[in-house]
Image (tube, rainbow, N blue to C red):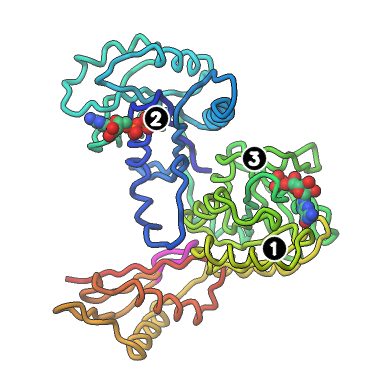
Amino acid sequence: MKPVMALVGRPNVGKSTLFNRLTKSRDAIVADYAGLTRDRHYGNAKHGRYEFIVIDTGGFEPDAESGIYKEMAKQTRQAVAEADVVVFVLDARAGVSAQDHDIANYLRRLGKPTVLAANKAEGMTEGAQLGEFYELGLGEVHPVSAAHGQGIRSLVDEAFDPLNLPEEDDAAEQQQTGIVKLAVAGRPNVGKSTLINAWLGEERLVAFDLPGTTRDTISVPFERNGQKFELIDTAGIRRKGKVFEAIEKFSVVKTLQAIETAHVVLLLLDATQGVTDQDAHIAGYILESGRAVVLAVNKWDATDDYQREQLRRQIETRLAFLKFADLHFISAVKRQGLGPVWASIIQAHRSAMVKMTTPVLTRLVLEAVQFQAPKRSGMFRPKLRYAHQGGMNPPIIVVHGNSLEHVTDAYKRFLEGRFRKEFNLVGTPLRIEMKSSK
Ligand code: GDP
Ligand code: GDP
């Protein structure tokens, strides 16, 4: 499971600037997907040896008593409680304020690993002005400049090094088992627990034991028609002795971790509510994670023709970036439409793990060029020479040649279509990278 870093601090110290700085490298991957809106509070980050989820807690009022602030404070406390490490952001120029002391008290009581980041420290001589932050009683202060990208890498190391996180060997693990790791994601009340209970109550579903599950992950291993699955918890299931029980407690952090851990994510929508912002945000995380995905619209039993038509249109526009995924209309309560969902999950998994050889990829590239050559751009005509597979889950195809930086997005989509058709890839994103030789 990816570790989680929560950014806390009073308004204006630079939390969102730091958040943007930390999540920047991942932004590039998804920049060109139409329709993708991003939740500015949760993101993926990769710095040095660490890949992690970062949460910007926004305006932090740990003791707010009422209204929207109370709800925000609740969510903030939940996020902080679920984080592995807290980065307490301070303003190096403004010095310590009363509110900083309040937050420090809260964090000390929490007893969670915490590092202090004195932001806006560019051009300041270290030590001189930072001394007063020690009175917060939370240890050392790390000068950073979120705006200028200074001290970020060492802040990340300071945050995660002491946690001794287990090394994750993705490649080895993916080869190992043949087990499909599945996460059911969706906002509260879409019917995740109902669906999981319906599944777990199926006769042909047989639970088995899986030794050594990682850090407080709860997963449910089971076999269905000879295929092994591992259902990753999104905070919806709890183990009670030998049986599993679904409980209702939505957690964005658990959802993100489950998405990252899974091979295939089943994204559940509620037919009676349409596609909400929160649905679109969760869909955005799935896209960003590169995981395979199956869409299912639940509570189909409770809709009329008009609602169904509206919904189809909403999905087409708001979730356009997931159009590679199969779409199902189901009723978890009535147990309708569930069979085809399994078929799509297996198909998505197979697609995510596909192996494509260099000769076949190269032949496809050359055939595509013959069918339709890439457009000339000024003096340059891109020349595609060969291709190889650069990764799986999601599959990555690396195309080699000359002047490939001039290949248009439209042409990449054309190539993607041909690759998808040849390898029958459904339900997985497919990344195409262009590599020019000099
Ligand atoms: P938040 O309210 O804690 O999320 O703070 P913001 O990220 O919105 O930043 C508040 C202000 O501080 C903005 O005007 C930023 O441009 C500025 N700021 C953020 N980081 C730095 C920094 O590293 N150096 C300087 N000089 N200003 C910064
Ligand atoms: P979760 O928060 O995503 O786990 O959602 P739940 O499984 O707790 O379901 C939320 C509510 O939706 C409950 O009242 C369920 O009975 C109801 N529900 C779940 N699936 C369906 C369905 O297929 N049709 C209808 N009409 N209601 C459903």
Point out the frontmost of discs 3 and 1.
1
- Asked if disc 3 is less than 8 Å from ligand 2, the answer is yes
In front of the other: label 3 or label 2?
A: 3
State the image quarter where residue 302 is shown: bottom right
Q: Amino acid at mark 1?
A: Gln
Query: For the magenta stretch, what is the residue range?
Result: 389-396
- Mark 1 sits on what residue? 307
Q: Is residue 7 visible?
A: yes
Which quadrant of the structure image shows residue 243?
top right
- Kindly state the secondary structure of the residue where label 2 is placed: helix
Task: Name, please, the residue furthest toward the front.
Answer: 306
User: Label 2: few (<14), some or many (≥20) within 10 Å?
Assistant: some
Residue at image position (20%, 20%) is 126
Mark before the other along the chain sequence, 2 or 1: 2
| Among numbered discs 3 and 1, the one appearing first in the sequence | 3
Give the residue at mark 2: 159
Left or right: residue 94 compared with residue 215: left
In the picture, the quarter occupied by the C terminus is bottom left
* Disc 2 residue type (three-letter): Ala
Label 3 to label 2: alpha-carbon separation: 26 Å
List the residue tagged with mark 3.
250
Residue 337 percent location from the top left of the image: 76, 66
Name above or below for residue 293 compared with residue 70: below
